[in-house]
Image: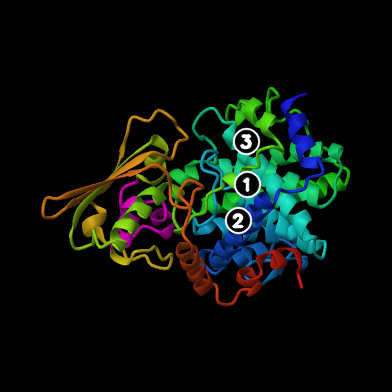
Amino acid sequence: MSHIAAILDFAAAPHVLLPQVRADAERLLADTLAGGAAGAASPEALNLLPAVRGWGAGDEARTLSANKLPAPSAAFFNGFAIHCLEWDAVHEPAVVHALSAVTAALLAASDRATGSESDDFLIALAVGVDIASGLGLSATGPMQFFRPATAGVIGAALAVARLEGLSHDQMADVLGLAYSFAGGTMQAHFEASIALPLQIGRAAQAAVQAVDLVKAGLSGPHDVLEGPFGYSNLVEPLDLSSYAASLGTVWRISEVSIKPYPSGRASHGALGALAELQNAGAVSLETVLSVELFAPPLIHRLVGRQYQHDAPMSYNRLCLAFLAPLMLRDGYIDPRLNDAIPSLAEKVTVTLDENPDGNAMSPQRLVVRFKDGATIERQIDANLGSPDAPMSPAQYAAKYDLCRALAPNCDPRIFDDPLSYATDPR
């Protein structure tokens, strides 16, 4: 059996989620909606909404800011909102924010169908996250394109196709069209442009549109993963053999990490270590001279950028030099605050270690030097919020409390009953 056939069989097969997998799906849905509600209330999302409203008439689906739009437009807005604060869950080994495009697309699909069954929604979510993550896991080199969008659109499209009851043959066309619509450049990350979450929004929108087109009778190319002009040859090299062999036995949604802070995931190892030290009274903004993080290439590439005076928040969320002083001062990261601390920001550095893995996020080593000449070192083997370093109940509560404070006008079910919010558009 070909690898693409195995993926399509998995997408179309009847599934019953194991209790732990179902619980993980529900937990991660709740996290995604909370961060998305906060993002939907951000200045960037408020600026985006008028443009999205102009793309078509209709009120099929809700946005996380309590507006209604045509389903593809709602998917676009919600995908943007979920990622724009950099607070969305990520499958670290895959380097894919696997829930972002998938959740946004499924919310739109469920709404325009006037709701869905809880189990059907969660299974579609788990399937879409699995496929998006699987493509990332199968990559044999570092990202050249923005993987959460290029892999995300494929996972999201097959998730929507499943929720809407398309056949196996139709799913093959949906996958082909999703690949045809795939896009997302790492140049946006390199420049820390607001185009980064826009690419997630476009992936969610394209997923809904791919399903609509197949339902209307249009077809897509079929050998789009390993064909001569397929994903593996044009987007990034893939070795799908290991992932295909694990389909249905290892559920990748249970491997996904939650972000405690609204910042690039690559900053969380250092921020988590600094938070622990700050909570213990071992460090403070007044006593620290410099912070140096020794880290793999991906960490250096994603958050090792230099501090820039008056940079936009899209830059600062991806800049450890901006974030670390805020953590030392406040003990948390508030996405509303853009008050930099230049005196220390200019002394925060990310130094390449000898790790040759272009997709690795750990291990890392944090070195804090003090004004009195003392030094503290911390080994970071897993980022806070990952399966190997789970957040405490208090840390979960702190995240949700801040998200709720940022989104006072959202549907309260987003926080109080997220599965009901996702599946019942009343």
Q: CA distance from mark 3 to mark 1?
A: 13 Å
What colour-coding does the image apply? rainbow
User: Is 327 included in the stretch rendered in magenta?
Assistant: yes
Q: CA distance from mark 1 to mark 2?
A: 8 Å
Q: Earlier in the sequence, mark 3 or mark 1?
A: 3
Q: Which amino acid, by three-letter code, is at mark 3?
A: Leu
Residue 204 in view: no
Query: x and y percent of residue 139 in the render?
Result: 57, 31
In the structure shown, which secondary structural element does the residue marked by tag 1 occupy? helix
Res. 381 image quadrant: top left
Residue at figure coordinates x 71%, y 48% from the top left: 18
Query: x and y percent of residue 272 in the render?
Result: 38, 54
User: What is the residue that sits farthest to the left in this orientation?
Assistant: 372
- Quarter of the image with the C terminus in it: bottom right
Q: Which residue is mark 2?
A: 28
Q: Which amino acid, by three-letter code, is at mark 1?
A: Ile
Q: Nearer the viewer, mark 3 or mark 1?
A: 1
Res. 355 image quadrant: top left
Q: Which residue is mark 3?
A: 135
Query: x and y percent of residue 321 in the render?
Result: 31, 52
Q: Which residue is mark 1?
A: 253
Residue at figure coordinates x 82%, y 65% from the top left: 114
Q: Nearer the viewer, mark 2 or mark 3?
A: 2
Q: Is residue 47 left or right of residue 2?
A: left
User: What is the residue that sits farthest to the bottom in this orientation?
Assistant: 409
Query: x and y percent of residue 15 in the render?
Result: 78, 45
- Quarter of the image with the N terminus in it: top right
Q: Which amino acid, by three-letter code, is at mark 2?
A: Leu
Is the Cβ of the residue at disc 1 closer than 8 Å to that at disc 2?
yes
The residue range painted magenta reads: 305-328
